[in-house]
Image (cartoon, rainbow, N blue to C red):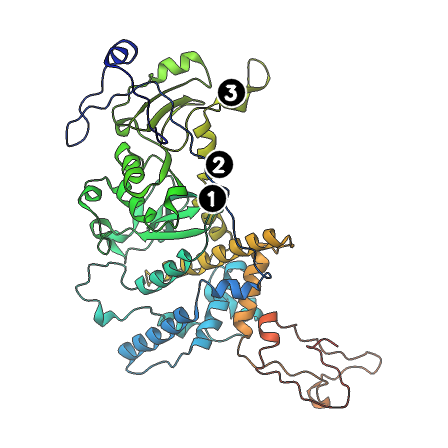
Amino acid sequence: MGKNSLKTVSLAELLQDTPEPSPPDGKEGRRRLWTHEYIETFQVPDSSFSLPDAVKTPFQYFKMLFTDEMITHISEQTNLYAAQELGDSISTSPEEIEKFLAMLLFMGVFSFPAIDDYWCIESRFSVIAYIMPFKLLRRYLHFNDNQKCNGSPDRFYKIRPLFDMLRQQCLLISSTYQHSVDEVMVAYKGTRAGSLRQYIANKPDKWGFKLFCRASSSGIIHDFLLYQGASTFFNVALTEQEEALLLGAKLVTTLCKTITLPRLSVVFCDNFFTSFDLVQNLQENLGIRYIGTVRPNRMGGATLKTDKELMKEGRGAFDFMSAEGLLAVKWFDNKCVSLLSSACGIIPLSSVKWWSKEAKAKVAVPCPSLIHAYNQHMGGIDLSDMLVHMYKTPAKSRLWYLPLFGYILDLCISNAWLVYKRDCSLLKEARMPLKKFRLAVAHTLAQVNKPASKVGRPSSSSLPQMSSNKKSSTPRPSHPQQDVQYDNFGHLPLHSNKRGRCNLCPK
């Protein structure tokens, strides 16, 4: 008998000990026999990652995701769009695009009410204002050739190349064996995107673009799919069986096809995606186990106790049934919740502590094993969303695709910091917080391929006239980031037999 299979029982035992079979389910009209049988718990192996030689710099982790290819592509498409609109290119370069990215990263940390406030006299912010002018490049920033997109079924064609390049880099990141799939909202309140803008009432950003993402339990997003209505799957090959699935089931199946080791993996989803057909399809066709909350009308005909019956038994009461290697569970906590599972069962029972008004103390409440597993590994997307919103790139613009570009930049920082954090943990080194990590990347982008500032004593004519009893001092230039300190650009030491000192080099 294989894993997740049910033991065979006689027809007489079924008639005596089990409820009546459920009504016909599915297109074939077959009947599922639900029994009070346990399924075997799948032991998920511990995740193991190769030990890095050393912890890289923040800029190197960022460039693993936001590659030179992406920067060159933005530069070329921006020049092309400006030539189409103005009749002449604005002659931007990849180096200028890097400075532009640095300014956006700074603005995510140092938030001003309006973009112009960084340059105006009353509130000038020198860290950003000294890098370069901002408005012209932002006005003509572009990511795809408009003249080649006529008649395309892709409604996100203006930003699609960047998402495709980022997706390929995210798929290269090694993952844990626990994955979660959920939706992400990229805030946008404008009307220029038409029906691409979605509304979800229970989200912090209620209006915006909807993405469906797959993340590991550590919060790293590995795959995503832009939602655009009926044409969402225009570039995805689906079988006839997958075409018959509900929208949520098709999304999960598509995102799970890129999992590296599917037979060792477990996927966690909420009730928007979960259905009996999805859980069965993932296990039979891809070998992926599944745990997720489910709506009562998608449980495949399982007849569990009603909410009133469980509430009479008290907090912690549960009921379960199984069919075809899948387990359906209903558990009463503050309210009743239903789950479907092909990876984890009831046993071993764990316990959670809740405050009891009657006892005026915390009491232990029994909790099935799959509830604990779901709560432990479901939050990967929420963790990534929280990190993205902590220092968010400002994206207010008449161009509807700029908020999506801002999300790409913030996601690169979030994923890069989580990979950096994992490497620090493997090598047992101290890690910097997300804000310092983002600022380190921004400083490097602003300084790379840029001549160093002049050092040394300024001429007497450039010094302000001061009284003789006060000592004059010049501010020391800021120390460059490690990535640009030894890049042999703008700061070339000369060989000499005479010993000297440099403000930027160690002794």
User: What is the count of numbered marks?
Assistant: 3
Quadrant of res 87: bottom left
> As displayed, is residue 140 above or below residue 327?
below
**Is residue 111 at least partly visible in the picture?**
no
Which structural element holds mark 3? strand
Which structural element holds mark 2? helix
> As displayed, is residue 262 above or below residue 290?
below
Q: Name the residue type under label 2.
A: Gln
Binning the other alpha carbons within 10 Å of mark 2 as few (below 14), some (14 to 19) or many (20 upward) gives few
Q: Nearer the viewer, residue 17 or 491?
A: 17
Q: Name the residue type under label 3.
A: Val
Residue identifier under label 2: 376
Judged left or right of residue 236, residue 473 is right
Residue 11 placement (x, y as % from top left): 23, 14
Judged left or right of residue 501, residue 377 is left
Indicate the quadrant containing the C terminus: top left, top right, bottom left or bottom right.
Answer: bottom right
**Is residue 375 at least partly visible in the picture?**
yes
Kindly indicate whether the residue at mark 1 contacts the one at mark 2 (C-beta within 8 angstroms): yes
Residue identifier under label 1: 217
Q: Earlier in the sequence, mark 1 or mark 3?
A: 1
Q: Residue lying furthest left in this view? A: 28
Mark linked to residue 365:
3
Task: Tell me the CA gap for discs 2 and 1.
Answer: 8 Å
